[in-house]
Image (cartoon, rainbow, N blue to C red):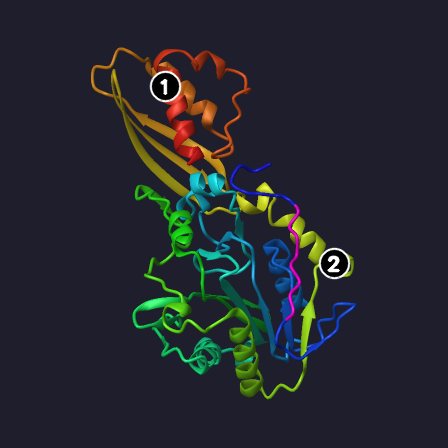
Amino acid sequence: MLRACVFSTWRSHSRKRGLSTAANNTLSPHHSIYVSNSSNPYFNLSLEDWLFRHKNHKEPLLLIYRDVPCVVIGRNQNPWKEVNMVASRTTGVPWIRRRSGGGTVYHDLGNTNFSIHLPRSSFDRHATAQVVLRAVRSLGVDANINDRNDICVGKDKVSGSAYKIVNNRAYHHGTMLISTRLDVLGDLLRSNKPTMETRGVASVRSPVCNLQQYEPSVSHEGFVEAVIDSFRQEYNIEDSTHTVEENVNTLGIDYIHKGMEELPRWDWAFGQTPEFTYNISRTFDWGTVTARIRSKHGIILNCSFELPDGHQSISDDLVQDQSRQLEGQRYGFLDETKEGIQRMMEGPGAEIWQWLKMEMDT
């Protein structure tokens, strides 16, 4: 089990909604508006990808869903840079790598996610943002769109967006903070690793707020209705709303099932991490050591050390041996049963090893 993820069985929550809905015994990609009744992020992210891949590319589609607490990082991001791993383990809130680009976001039941899919030929990020902006304004909140197409109230973000374009299809999906636990959001997204330099996409940190801070009457159900109305108006849609359940039928769809299995696997969660370097220093009783760790796709490529001048407590051979032992290991998942490691578990060598292990584990 990955220490930074929780792979328990998620329970979907069905709720009555103030919507005109059509019953779905068998999930079909041929509708235009979907609202998921599941709050399982692994299911919802896989459902979104299935709809993206199977819907007629010429037709618009809207998907709305909520998730239980989780952190969702972008396709090309470094989880050790974006996520407070200690807070993730302490709270039991998992992090998940999604299939679109962009930055890291926090989901909980106080946040509502929207996903608008369109033909690539007519895809316009500003236009799709306007669809959501109209919905928010209809709820009595004086919102605006910034130069990154994020929806804000004043200078505070209430919605962050990401995009995906494949062949002749594209989507814009985003969050909408309604009554999210902003304190938990802050704790989980505060990784504090300024000396970790990554070739991947770094999140743009911005002040955030909830819609309810400006209009207490705003609710998840009200936002869902408002977005559906705005979507129908923009794309001249008359299709009814189709609710999606996480049940034996939807879980039996091979593409969704395989997607849910893939998201928590090490190869996807950690193995897709872009190359990065991490420069760290630690002062011991016998001197200060600086380490430079380089990793790609979750595998340590090399680790170099700078030792204090005139050091006598640790030999150069021992440090070089530690470098060799680290090469090829999974970053953050050091195998201490590897041959040769036990002889480094005494004296200063053990101190350096435990320090590196702690740094990579956080």
Residue 143 seen in render: yes
Residue 247, disc: 2
Q: Position of residue 147 (x, y in %)?
A: 34, 73
Query: Is residue 10 covered in magenta?
Result: yes
Q: Does 310 sit left or right of 10 as displayed?
A: left
> What residue is at 56 percent from the left and 83 percent from the top?
229
Q: Which mark is residue 101?
A: none
Q: Are marks 1 and 2 in contact (CB under 8 Å)?
A: no
Name the element at disc 1: helix
Which residue position holds label 1?
351
Viewer-side residue, 206 vs 179 = 179
Q: Position of residue 255 (x, y in %)?
A: 71, 58
**Residue 269 location (% of width, % of height):** 55, 46
Q: Nearer the viewer, residue 20 or 290?
A: 20
When asked about the image quadrant of residue 350, the answer is top left
At x 40%, y 72%, the residue is: 149
In the rendered structure, which segment of residues is drawn in magenta?
Answer: 9-16
Q: Determine whether, in the image, residue 186 is placed left or right of residue 259.
A: left
Q: Residues within 10 Å of mark 1 (few under 14, many from 20)?
A: some
Residue drawn at x 55%, y 19% is: 337
User: Residue 315: percent from the left, percent from the top?
Assistant: 33, 13
Q: Amino acid at mark 2?
A: Asn
Residue 55 appears anywhere in the view = no
Quarter location, residue 250: bottom right
241 with respect to 117 (left or right): right
